[in-house]
Every structure is written in C-alpha cells, then in structure tokens.
Image (cartoon, grey):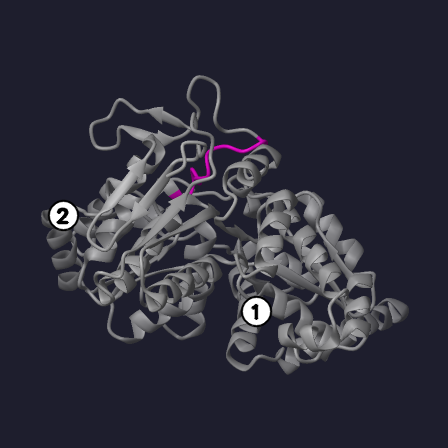
C-alpha cells in the first residue's frame, strides 16, 4: 500500500483480512463472529419462526452474525426490497418479523404486510425509543408541506418521494400531490419513465437535496450524450426529451442525510490526491463534489454512482473480471457511502475469490473518512467507534461515515428481543412495534393512504411502467380540484 495514502482501509483476501488504521480494524473485528453467538441466534430464530430483514447499514458486529446464520429467513439489503421480503417471510410461515433499520423501514414493512392481508403477523423494532432519520425528519415539517402545496398548483404535478420518509409524510404528500415512492436504485428510472408516460408532467423530488441536485446534474450530463447513448439509459428518451426533463424537474432544497453530508469538499480533495488509480463509488445521496468525482470515474468504467445495491454490484463485477484475467492484482475501491456496507462487500468479494482460489487477486476497501474520526468508548465489547476524537473527525468537510440511528440496532438488543418473543406478555413489547398512525387523511388512516405511494412503486418495480391509477391521478387531479373550487 502506498504510504501517501491516509484513509483507513481493509484488504480482503480469500482466507483473511488485513486492516490498516483503527477505523478499519473496528470494521474488521466482527467479520468473523463468535460461533456460539451465531448458534444461539440461529436456534432461537428457527424455534420461534422469526423473520429478520436488515439494512446494509447495520454495524459489522450485527451483520457478521446475521450473515453467518443458516436460518433462511434472514435478509440484508437496501430499503427497496426489505418490506417485500418481510411479506414473503410471513407467507412462508414466519410468525413474526423483526426489522433492523430506522423507523420508516419498520413502518413500510407493517404497511405492506397489512396490504397483503397479513395483519396477524407482528412487526418489531429492536429499540423501545424512536430510531430516527434526518431525511425523514426533513420531510415531516411544515416547510416540506408548504413546498408540496406550492407544487400542487402546477398542472400535472407528480411527487417522487424518497422512501426514507414516514408513512405520515407519504400520506400527507399523496393527499396534496399524486405521489410515488422511490429508492436510490430506481429513482432515475422512475423519474425518466414518468416523463415518458405522462405528457407535460412536472416532477417534484424530495426530500433529499443532494440526490435532487445530483439527479439534475445527471440529466444535464445526459443532454450532452447522443440519442443512442441516452436510449441505453432509458429507451424512451432522446436529447430533445431530456431537455424537457431538465425544464420540469425540481427538488426540495432543505433535506440532508447526516451521513452522506460527510462526503464533502475536504474528503473529495484527498481522494483526488491520494487515490489516483482507485475505483470510486458514490451513493446518490452524497454532496455534489463526491458525486462529480464518481461520475467522472464512471465514464471510464472506474466508478459507480447509485444505490447501495449498485455499489455492491459494481464491486462484484470488477472482482469477477479480475479473477477471470488471472495473475496478481489488487483492486482498491473508495467506499462513498455508509461504512456498514463493508460486511456485504466482504462476503461477496470472498465468495468470488474462494471460487477462484490462488488467483492472486486482492480487494482493498478504502473508507474516505478522517483518520481522527474514531473515539474510544471505554467498553470491552466495542472499544472503538466512528465518532469525534479530540474535536476532529466529523465535519461538513468530511468525517465519520456511519449513521448513529442505524447503530441503535445492536446485536445485544436483537438477541434480547428474540428471547422475549413468545415469552413476554405482548403488551410489554408494545413500544417495540412500529408507530401506529391513527390520524385521518382525507377520511382514511395515515397508515392506509401512506401505503398507496409504496404500492405505486411496487407496480413500477414489477412492470417497468407507472400504474394506470397514478397516471390518471396526475393527469386529472389539478383539473378536478379546480372544478370543485369553481362550484364551491
């Protein structure tokens, strides 16, 4: 490894890991979990028929144990498929579902189970207190509601809302503007399909400001492509139609993910200086500087911009290509998203390396965080955590790429909850259920109407087209509202 590189990194070989820096050591510590803990959790989940859906951003200790279990009803992914897998687990006979993530994820799972007629299957979080999300909080404000009210005055308005929002936000939004949810893995196709299938549509995206700006930049870069290149991104578009997309696409300006906010100017400067020759990955939520860097790398097929799944797929593809070429080679990737993704990356990389034993290929993951972005806890089970040390580390210029809300999902909390299920009186576990939204929105519960934008997304995911109901709503709602106002 070059001595000029200062980012902590984890080198992945087919039979071991080599950590460089305290941050990487903390990530690597739990990639080979205690077999006794794995056996206990495995046995409890099977005995009690509990399904577990978890987000990529769980801490390595928790992910390491989950990935080592043999119980088939455990799934780690991005938020796009978590609720769908929860439904599949319940249909397969799981008596309860535990969601490891922030609160909107358990809310989504609860809503989709209810829509599937599985109201009898309980959903649990692992914390009695709220597990928040800075993006969800940004959308659950009067400011966001005012922005949507202004958008509703535009004919043929469509609200594309990031799924990282509460059911109440989704319900209130849909009552104002026809709304479809999206994730980082399908947002580009959702927006472009809306412009292809709804004439004269205006798309309003929120609440993630960075993702909105990055989408705007992406569409700007597409306007410079040839029609053939554009059709590879979306078959219904050309330079002429992308020009209209740019005119009618708007985003909310006051919503940020506190983790991806860390990938700022200082971190990007250091990546440019120290990581020449490295592959660059960036989540769609990162600030513009990191997005631009990854977009540049992507043009040379040395980078990826997208969702957590897109990042994992890119790294896996590059590793498979390297082992196919044969010979000694080290692939280094700059991980431009939450550090919790390292567990899934390591699992996929080692699977490929072990399938081609002796290839001489190694994978190196660099965490673009300040080397000072760690702190001692004084605890024996987790001595070092990402955080502020000596007043340095986390800042808007780049710092600790880990979500404090996601880290509220601990291994101890999971095991404690699993032990209590089917033993404790259910009333004692009431605080572990997703929040119940009983308020009415247009005569329906917030939980009921809040599930509609998710169902629109599920239809799009399955068919590649917007649902006829959503297209009709976008096309006629403004006119229907005006007609009602005229006769009032």
Task: Check the picture and name the quadrant holding the N terminus.
Answer: top left
421 is within the stretch colored magenta: no
Locate residue 202 relative to residue 452 in the image: left or right: right
Percent across and percent down for residue 315 are 42, 59
Percent across and percent down for residue 298 are 57, 58
Tell me what residue is drawn at x 22 percent, y 62 percent: 354
Q: Secondary structure at mark 2?
A: helix
In the rendered image, the residue lying farthest to the front is 327
Bounds of the magenta span? Answer: 396-406
Q: Which residue is mark 2?
A: 37
Percent across and percent down for residue 270 are 54, 35
Between 23 and 172, the one nearer to me in the picture: 23
Circle nearer the N terminus (2, 1):
2
Kindly report the distance in space between the C-alpha atoms of the residues bearing marks 2 and 1: 40 Å
Residue 452 has which mark?
1
Tell me what residue is drawn at x 53 percent, y 63 percent: 185
């Amino acid at each position: 490894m070059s001595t000029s590189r200062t980012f902590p990194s984890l080198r992945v070989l087919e039979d071991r890991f080599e950590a460089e820096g305290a941050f990487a050591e903390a990530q690597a510590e739990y990639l080979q979990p205690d077999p006794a803990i794995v056996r206990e959790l495995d046995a409890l989940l099977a005995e009690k028929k509990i399904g577990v859906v978890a987000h990529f951003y769980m801490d390595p200790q928790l992910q390491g144990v989950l990935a080592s279990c043999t119980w088939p009803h455990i799934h780690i992914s991005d938020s796009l498929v978590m609720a769908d897998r929860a439904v599949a687990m319940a249909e397969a006979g799981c008596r309860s579902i535990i969601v490891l993530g922030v609160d909107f994820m358990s809310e989504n799972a609860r809503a989709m189970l209810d829509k599937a007629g599985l109201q009898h299957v309980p959903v649990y979080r692992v914390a009695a207190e709220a597990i928040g999300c800075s993006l969800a909080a940004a959308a659950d404000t009067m400011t966001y509601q005012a922005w949507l009210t202004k958008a509703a005055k535009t004919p043929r308005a469509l609200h594309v809302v990031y799924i990282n929002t509460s059911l109440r936000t989704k319900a209130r939004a849909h009552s104002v503007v026809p709304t479809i949810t999206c994730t980082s893995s399908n947002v580009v196709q959702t927006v472009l399909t809306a412009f292809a299938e709804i004439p004269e549509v205006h798309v309003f995206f929120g609440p993630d400001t960075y993702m909105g700006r990055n989408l705007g930049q992406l569409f700007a870069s597409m306007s410079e492509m040839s029609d053939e290149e554009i059709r590879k991104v979306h078959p219904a578009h050309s330079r002429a139609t992308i020009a209209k997309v740019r005119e009618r696409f708007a985003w909310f300006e006051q919503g940020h993910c506190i983790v991806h906010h860390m990938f700022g100017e200082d971190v990007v400067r250091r990546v440019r200086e120290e990581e020449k020759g490295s592959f660059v990955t960036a989540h769609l939520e990162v600030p513009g500087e990191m997005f631009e860097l990854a977009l540049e790398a992507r043009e040379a097929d040395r980078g990826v911009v997208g969702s957590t799944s897109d990042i994992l797929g890119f790294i896996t593809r590059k590793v498979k290509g390297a082992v196919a070429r044969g010979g000694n080679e080290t692939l280094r990737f700059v991980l431009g998203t939450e550090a919790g993704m390292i567990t899934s990356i390591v699992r996929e990389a080692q699977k490929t390396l072990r399938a081609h034993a002796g290839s001489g290929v190694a994978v190196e993951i660099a965490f673009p965080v300040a080397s000072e972005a760690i702190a001692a806890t004084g605890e024996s089970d987790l001595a070092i955590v990402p955080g502020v040390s000596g007043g340095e580390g986390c800042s808007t210029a780049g710092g600790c790429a880990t979500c404090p809300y996601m880290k509220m999902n601990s291994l101890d909390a999971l095991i404690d909850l699993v032990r209590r299920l089917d033993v404790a009186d259910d009333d004692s576990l009431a605080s572990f259920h997703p929040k119940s939204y009983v308020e009415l929105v247009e005569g329906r519960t917030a939980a009921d109407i809040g599930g509609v934008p998710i169902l629109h997304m599920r239809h799009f995911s399955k068919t590649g087209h917007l649902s006829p109901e959503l297209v009709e709503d976008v096309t006629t709602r403004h006119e229907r509202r005006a007609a009602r106002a005229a006769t009032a």
